[in-house]
């Protein structure tokens, strides 16, 4: 009888242990989150959308989350796309374009249990986090590169829209250029689109044809400005993604994103049920923004100057919009000892610094 009792106890213990492991395995499976990524461009555009896609691929590999995505999603199609991603199991939705903001608030209310992340957005909520990087810091460094490299003192800038995000980049770039070359001028041509290749190509050609441009930079998702510059023997400074291998003869550097440095800690917070619906605007010290390696055509001394200024930013000794700063009409906008506030930079930067010439 004693042996029978012992055997029964062993069997019961085995069953309990088995149930425990099955339960734990099921729990582990449930803890694997799925992230839905909404891109306004393609995942291989070698620009804005690919920077997000690559960053999320690295994040999924690091954290073991599932990644599903949609490409070339029009703003008006956002709700339908999000519905699909959530029906496929997405518990986190990342939207990579400012333009999605018009629709995202209502969608987030529709799905209060889902975490939403909106790149370059401005409206936060209980389940919505906005985020961006202080790319204007890297724009300033790009401006230093251009200011020291140019022989004509005329630099072209192809830009999407005259919104705060783009304007602060133009201003930062120009301040950087004129900090090392007070004669430099930055000529801006608008495309009124993030992704329209034809508009970007036209704007690039107009700048080169109408001015003595020897360096061309950009704030568009289209890489057409780099192609036009290369065909015309004009040096270029890219944005979003390092395309140096595509244009080795004319590419100087680029202001690039490393989104995994934001996504990894944020997605991990979601896994730990520590989501916080607040805005994030991270600087160069976090690694979210950086300057691509200088090309072989960069003049001697540029690397050293860039490294010096980068060190000041990383240490918090200097930031771009410290006064005195004058606007394009010569008016003093920022007094010495003062700086442009984050609120102005994010929401109401509607003027241009001295040295900017727009086609408006």
Image (tube, rainbow, N blue to C red):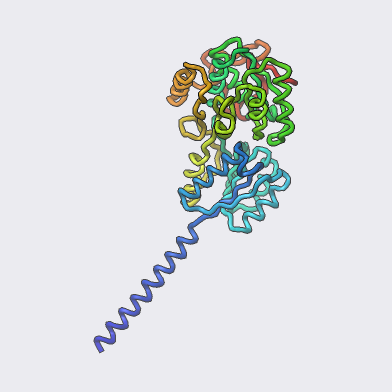
Q: Quadrant of the N terminus?
A: bottom left
**Which residue is most to the left?**
2
Residue 339 percent coordinates (x, y): 55, 19
Residue 175 percent coordinates (x, y): 58, 17
Work out whether residue 120 can be spotted. Answer: yes
Residue 76 percent coordinates (x, y): 73, 45
The answer to whether residue 312 is above or below residue 52 is above
Q: Nearer the viewer, residue 306 or 231?
A: 231
Q: Nearer the viewer, residue 29 or 316?
A: 29
Q: In this view, does 56 lie to the left or right of 95?
A: left
**Which residue is most to the bottom?**
1
Q: In which quarter of the image is the C terminus?
A: top right
Q: Which residue is drawn at 59% across and 51% down?
A: 36
Residue 278 percent coordinates (x, y): 55, 40
The answer to whether residue 87 is above or below residue 358 is below
Q: In which quarter of the image is residue 154?
A: top right
Q: Residue at x 74, y 27 (%)?
A: 202
Work out whether residue 335 can be spotted. Answer: no
Q: Is residue 156 left or right of residue 8?
A: right
Q: Quadrant of residue 211?
A: top right
Q: Which of 119 and 180 is in front in this view?
A: 180
């Amino acid at each position: 009888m004693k042996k029978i009792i012992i055997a029964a106890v062993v069997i019961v213990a085995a069953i309990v242990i088995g149930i425990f492991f099955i339960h734990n395995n099921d729990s582990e499976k449930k803890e694997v989150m799925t992230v839905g990524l909404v891109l306004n461009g393609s995942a291989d555009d070698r620009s804005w959308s690919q920077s997000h896609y690559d960053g999320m691929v690295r994040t999924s590999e690091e954290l073991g989350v599932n990644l599903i995505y949609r490409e070339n999603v029009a703003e008006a199609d956002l709700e339908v796309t999000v519905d699909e991603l959530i029906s496929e199991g997405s518990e986190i939705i990342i939207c990579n374009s400012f333009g999605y903001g018009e629709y995202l608030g209502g969608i987030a209310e529709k799905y209060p249990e889902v975490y939403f992340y909106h790149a370059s957005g401005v409206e936060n909520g209980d389940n919505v986090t906005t985020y961006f990087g202080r790319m204007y810091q890297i724009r300033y460094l790009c401006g230093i590169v251009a200011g020291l490299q140019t022989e004509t003192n005329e630099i072209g800038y192809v830009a999407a829209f005259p919104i705060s995000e783009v304007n602060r980049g133009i201003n930062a770039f120009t301040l950087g250029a004129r900090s090392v070359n007070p004669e430099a001028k930055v000529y801006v041509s608008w495309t009124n689109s993030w992704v329209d290749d034809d508009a970007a190509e036209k704007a690039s050609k107009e700048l080169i044809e109408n001015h003595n441009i020897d360096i061309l930079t950009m704030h568009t998702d289209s890489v057409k400005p780099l192609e036009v510059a290369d065909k015309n023997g004009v040096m270029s400074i890219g944005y979003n993604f390092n395309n140096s291998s595509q244009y080795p003869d004319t590419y100087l550097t680029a202001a690039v994103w490393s989104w995994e440095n934001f996504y990894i800690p944020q997605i991990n917070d979601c896994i730990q049920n520590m989501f916080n619906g607040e805005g994030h605007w991270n600087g160069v010290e976090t690694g979210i923004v950086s300057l691509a390696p200088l090309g072989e055509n960069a003049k001697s001394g540029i690397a050293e100057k860039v490294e010096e200024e980068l060190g000041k930013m990383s240490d918090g000794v200097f930031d771009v919009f410290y006064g005195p700063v004058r606007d394009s009409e010569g008016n003093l906008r920022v007094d010495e000892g003062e700086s442009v506030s984050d609120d102005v930079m994010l929401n109401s930067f509607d003027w241009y610094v001295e040295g900017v010439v727009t086609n408006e």
